[in-house]
Image (tube, rainbow, N blue to C red):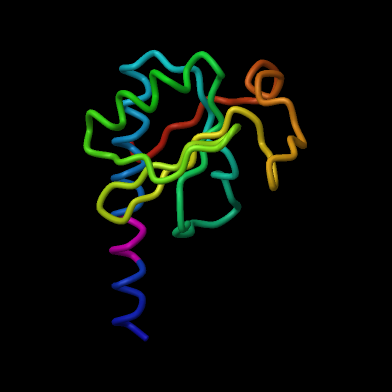
Amino acid sequence: MRGELIREEARYKWFMRNVAKVIDALNKAGAEYALHKFRKPFDHVSVDLDILISVDGMSKAVKVLVRRGFKVAVSEPYTVTLIRNGFIVDLYTNPSFAWVVYMDGEELLKCCTEEIDVSG
């Protein structure tokens, strides 16, 4: 059990280091964004980082992340998926499922975000 806990803690630290690097890149690019489905009542290691981003910020975000070593894996109407060293970032302009938008991303960015500190 102890070995499993150590491995999971290492995965969590790796994930959070990557989150901090992505946030730094987006801030430097001047992109308007919010971490989407990120805050949970417990620490966890997600399979990817979901980011809601303004339509105008999408191209800035993709460019800055590609410059930092990410590769575009998938580009769809409302989502771009980027990967670097096993770390996956999904950029969404509108939350959608099977290309069906179920929320207005621009409105969510205007009304429903909060500032949080992520990993210092």
Left or right relative to 62: residue 99: right
Image location of residue 54, percent across then percent down: 55, 19
- Specify the segment rendered in magenta: 9-13
Assess whether residue 10 is covered by the magenta stretch. Answer: yes
Q: Is residue 87 above or below residue 89?
A: below
Furthest residue in direction bottom, as rendered: 1
Q: Nearer the viewer, residue 59 or 40?
A: 59
What residue sits 60% from the left and 53% below the top? 41
State left or right for residue 6 relative to residue 61.
Answer: left
| The one of 39 and 36 positioned closer to us in this rendering | 36
Does residue 34 show up magenta in the picture?
Answer: no
Give the residue at x 29% y 54%: 14
Q: Residue at x 59, y 32 (%)?
A: 77
Q: Main secondary structure of the magenta part?
A: helix
Which quadrant, please, contains the C terminus? top left
Residue 57, x across and y down, in percent = 47, 17
Rendered position, 11 above or below 90: below
Measured along the vertical axis of the image, is residue 103 above or below residue 38?
above
Left or right: where does residue 64 sit relative to residue 103? left
Q: Position of residue 13 (x, y in %)?
A: 30, 55
Query: Residue 52: percent from the left, percent from the top?
Result: 56, 31
Q: Is residue 70 above or below residue 88?
A: above
